[in-house]
Amino acid sequence: MTTIKLTINNTPATLSVSPIKRLLDVLRDDLHLTGTKEGCGEGECGACAILMNGELVNSCLIPALQADNATLTTIEGLANATHLHPIQQCFLEQGGAQCGICTPGMILATHHLLAQYPNPTDAQIREGLAGNLCRCTGYMRIFESVRQAAAKSLLPNH
Amino acid sequence: MSETKSILGSSPLRKEGRPKVLGAAQYIDDLTLPGMWHGATVRSTIARGTIRSITFAPHINWSEYAIVRASDIPGENAIVHLPKDHPCLAAREINHVAEPILLLAHPEKSALLAAKAAIHIDYDELPGIFNIEASEAAVAAFINDPNDTDNIIWPGSSEGGTPNCFKNYQMYTGEAAPTESALVEAFEAADFIVEGEYTTGAQEQLYIEPNGVIAECDLDPVTGHVRGVTVRGSMQCPYYLVHALTLVFNLPEEKCRVIQVETGGAFGGKEDFPSVIGSHAALLAMKSGHPVKIIYDRGEDMAATTKRHPSRTRLRTAVSRDGKLLGGTIDVAIDGGAYATLSPVVLSRATIHAPGPYKWPHLRVRSKAMATNIPPHGAFRGFGAPQSLFALERHMDKIAYTIGFTPEEFRRRNFLSTGDHTATGQPLVEPVDMHHLLTRALADSGYHAKRAAFAESNQHSRIKRGVGFAAFMHGTGFTGSGERRLNSLVHLDILADGRPQVLVSSTEFGQGTNTILCQVAAEALHLPYDDILIHEVDTAAVPNSGPTVASRTAMIVGKLVERAANEVLATLRTQAALPTPHTREQFIAAAQRHHAQQGFLRASVRYEPPAKIFWDDDLYRGDAYPGYAWAVYVAEVAVDLNTYQVQVTRFDALQEVGRVLHPILAKGQIEGGIAQGIGYALYEKCVYKDGHLMNNQMTNYIMPTSADLPDIHVTFEEVPSLHGPGGAKGIGELPMDGPAPAILNAIENATGIGFNSIPLLPEDVYERLTSLTARPHGGAEDLNPVVDQATRTESPEVNA
Ligand code: FES
Ligand code: FES
């Protein structure tokens, strides 16, 4: 067991965990943040994607120790008490979520993409989400959700 | 509210969408019950043989574990399917790799891996049967010598099925004997006889959430007997699992409770398999006295659970010089895997869809599902139809090229239209206009202009481009008399506060069941969509509205919800003075009035077969489905002769699915199906070695990513159907049928070479192209000869 400190969704936390425990399990078991999903456990599907120090990572591949002193954002950290994050709102409106199991990772990948490219081209969207598999949508509604989210966040006052 | 605009045809927010985008939706692995243990499955490592011994290594403290073997099963050691050939746990005989033998549970999940590794099983191994041909050869040997049963791996069953063959069908356009002699005449009269063989591979559903359940067992404290079981899980058909549990535990139905939780994709892969994993977890709960959770990891899910049936279809067609189909024979064989499971039903849909949307004056379809030592194949979106329609739509292009027609013109001369009879003798009462669909799809996709332009540009490019299309249909609902047998029931309750609540066992796993059924109720009740509640699918509370399969939910269950809503209105109008028309406030007031005066209001509505729909199971003739969705899909491809990669560069999908209830959900369904269809055609290959799936990981089983797919253009023709709510038909499976043949037709247009097997990977393209150029007269391979009846000369495949 090691003690690790991290900031999770703007809240500091100190945990005592095995240093090789997967960050995915730390989130789900120790922090009870079950919005981060496991689809493959081998870095292929992106269902476990989160933001770590602003980078999009697959939490199933990260040992807990590596998250020491890190700042993490999971799907639970996007909305505020009353409002969905605009990306969440667009996924909801545009049919970007079907079964919803890929959705948390997909939304965080979109968050990361829009931080890099506020007004992404279609090619940038395809590339930016290529690490996140979705078996339900065929991605078209997801692309539309991303376009709408980009359009929204380009508006002033958002 | 009665004057508001229609809720059907609008796109309200998905009912359970908010928790999904928040990450708050609770899937099975997100749930923990007090005192819960974790379960694991010990599986066979051979494909065929018998268990000689099982040893438990002494370094593990086995007293900490609950261990279940076949002998612990209180009821029958069988999964619920009719022939009862499928054991819940293998007792002695092994029929496929990854067959479950023992179950383990422990309070700590991490303690399971080492325990599994510490169990050693010895086998007497037998040679396995791994494909259709080997299974057929075994049958041939057995017929030749009834003592030669060495390779008979499935004995036959009193429920139907013969050695190594789970089921076979024969379907004729008329009565058998006259059709046979008419076929002889048709082939004699033919100007051309065109033959072809087409094969398709297994396909993994690859829902992103693997199979998982949590089971609890209520044990009598004195006797230790099981009084009841409850299973929660990711699934499509909770009542299937109820029936499986009644068998395994020998309990009455009301003691077996099943609750579906949020389900992360299914596509057929969670239709019958939850009966297996659900029974397993419940047995462990019985043995341990604790709730037990089993969640498969990806590798186990892919290795042990069902896939789409591999298939081989042979067509022989008699065609006239003027482009008319005179007659044909179609022989479909599917690989069912080790146990019958759903193969007979999959085969039935494959059989009925084999003739496609065409008029066949004389046709015989024979089909069979063969046993192999592969884990049982099962349901996957399309359910047999993608296999036989792939064969047919490739073959239609082949005929066209052979007789000197364009693929378009040849199909036009043979399309079914309104008033015609399908191959099962079903009159097409509702309007069908394949000509219009084809015209519009080709125009929308720019097909003709592209065909001309690519013919030109391909001459000086190593990137060969092409366009192709497929025309097809998909029957909505259970095949034949299936809906009559299901006898589905729905409830619509009016709660004390006046809010309506839909109660069905139809499950949501992404397709939009919750949303669509609430829309239907809202429309019929003239209430806002947001007022409608839908009950959690818990068999202790919801009636059996049938399984959530076969594109039946919107059309069949939706219709029942609509009828229930009309009943509620009628009751409130006669008994609680609800005016006509009414406002939302008037409805709530009347509902509350009714509640105060007469108590709880529930409308229960059961399926009533449409008066004019009839199916004869023995003759295999009649009205196969209450309705059909019709479609033309156009694929555009680029084949890179440097890398042998095929890229789909654009996809157009036009369909007539009756009234579109929710345009955003409908498009999403179609796009998702097309993506799976593109994967089926070009990416997704199950690689087996001695019955082991070698690529049971997402790293080496490749499904399309966002970077692989083209723009998919989805459009609808809306022709309201008589049978569905608001005129809807089913759409869920249709999009799986068209992509593969459209893509391979486009590849033939691009390269001049007809590929007839999927999945078609770059190495397959490479092999074929290099073997062709290595021949003296490139293209002169005669895999599938065609015969010109006039000259009686055989010629090789003819290409555009
Ligand atoms: S679970 Fe981490 S990438 Fe799939
Ligand atoms: S919505 Fe189901 S996997 Fe993406």
Image (tube, coloured by chain):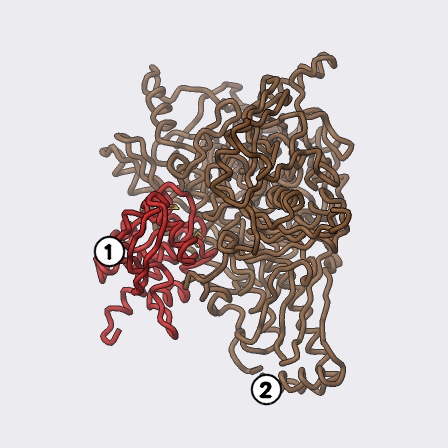
- What amino acid is labelled 2 in the image? Glu
- Chain painted in red in the figure: A
Mark nearest the camera among 2 and 1 is 1
Looking at the picture, do discs 2 and 1 lie on one chain?
no
The chain containing the residue under callout 1 comes to A
In the rendered structure, find residue A53 and report the number of the disc placed on it: 1
- Of the 4 image quadrants, the one containing the C terminus of chain A is bottom left
How many neighbours does mark 1 have within 10 angstroms: few (below 14), some (14-19), or many (20 or more)?
Answer: some
Determine the residue positioned at 73% across, 44% down: B249
Horizontally, is B234 left or right of B240 in the view? left
The chain containing the residue under callout 2 comes to B
Residue B167 in the image: x percent, y percent? Answer: 69, 33
Residue B788 in the image: x percent, y percent? Answer: 51, 24
Horizontally, is A88 left or right of B139 in the view? left
- Label 2, label 1: how many angstroms apart (C-alpha)? 52 Å
Query: Does A79 appear above or below B269?
Result: below
Q: Is residue B450 visible?
A: no
Q: How many marks?
A: 2
- What amino acid is labelled 1 in the image? Asn
**Residue that carries the numbered disc 2 in the rendered image:** B585
Query: Does B14 appear above or below B151?
Result: below
Report which quarter residue B82 is drawn in.
top right
Determine the residue positioned at 47% across, 63% down: B663
Residue B106 in the image: x percent, y percent? Answer: 55, 42
Q: Is residue A122 visible?
A: yes
